[in-house]
Amino acid sequence: VFFGCRAENDYLHKERMRSWAEMGVISDLQVAFSRLPGRNKEYVQDVVARHRDAVWAMLSDPNCHYYICGDSKMAEDVFGELKTTAKTAGGLDHIDSVQFFRKMKTERRYQADTWGVVPPKKLVEKKYNQAEAWLKNFDEKIEEE
């Protein structure tokens, strides 16, 4: 289990998950904290990156089921790291990594329960370009005055 939260007080089901890890119900528990005082931010995708070989060993097992729950942006970032893991630890190229996860989804071994909106990259670029043009226009008008 890879779990992410801001700080200890956000660590939902902490005692239960630790107990499950001790009992062997879950084989491993990795927790990422993004807002602990005096420590660098660490996100789930950072922890996944640190454990790429083990993550790939799990993902490449045909009995592996992957579940992700939480914010859509977080899920998108973790999925990006999973694709990197498939490429680096699994030796897959981009097309094969996409097909690998598509197959997991088709086999219902990849499930997501997320909330929030992740805008398409082209929309973000379009909005960025519009904002940049607006600022340039604004700067030119200021200079004219």
Image (cartoon, rainbow, N blue to C red):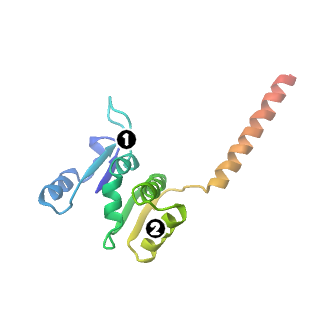
Q: Is residue 96 left or right of residue 127?
A: left
Q: Quadrant of the C terminus?
A: top right
On the picture, is 20 further left or further right than 34?
Answer: left
Residue that appears at 31% across and 40% down:
7
**Nearer the N terminus, badge 1 or badge 2?**
1
Q: Which residue is mark 2?
A: 101
Judge the density around disc 2: few (<14), some (14-19), many (≥20) Cα neighbours within 10 Å: some
Which residue does the image show at 22% across and 50% down from the upper left? 14
Q: Mark 1 vs mark 2: give the one in front.
A: 2
The amino acid on which the numbered mark 1 sits, given as a three-letter code, is: Glu
Q: At numbered mark 2, what does the secondary structure look like: helix, strand or loop?
A: helix
| Residue 35 relative to residue 97: left or right | left
In the picture of the structure, the residue carrying the numbered disc 1 is 42
Q: Residue furthest front?
A: 91
Q: Nearer the viewer, residue 143 or 24?
A: 24
- Quadrant of the snapshot with the N terminus: bottom left
Residue appearing at x 38%, y 72% in the figure:
109
Q: Nearer the viewer, residue 43 or 82?
A: 82
- 26 versus 105 height, above or below: above
Instruction: Kindly report the distance in space between the C-alpha atoms of the residues bearing marks 1 and 2.
Output: 25 Å
Above or below: residue 68 compared with residue 131: below
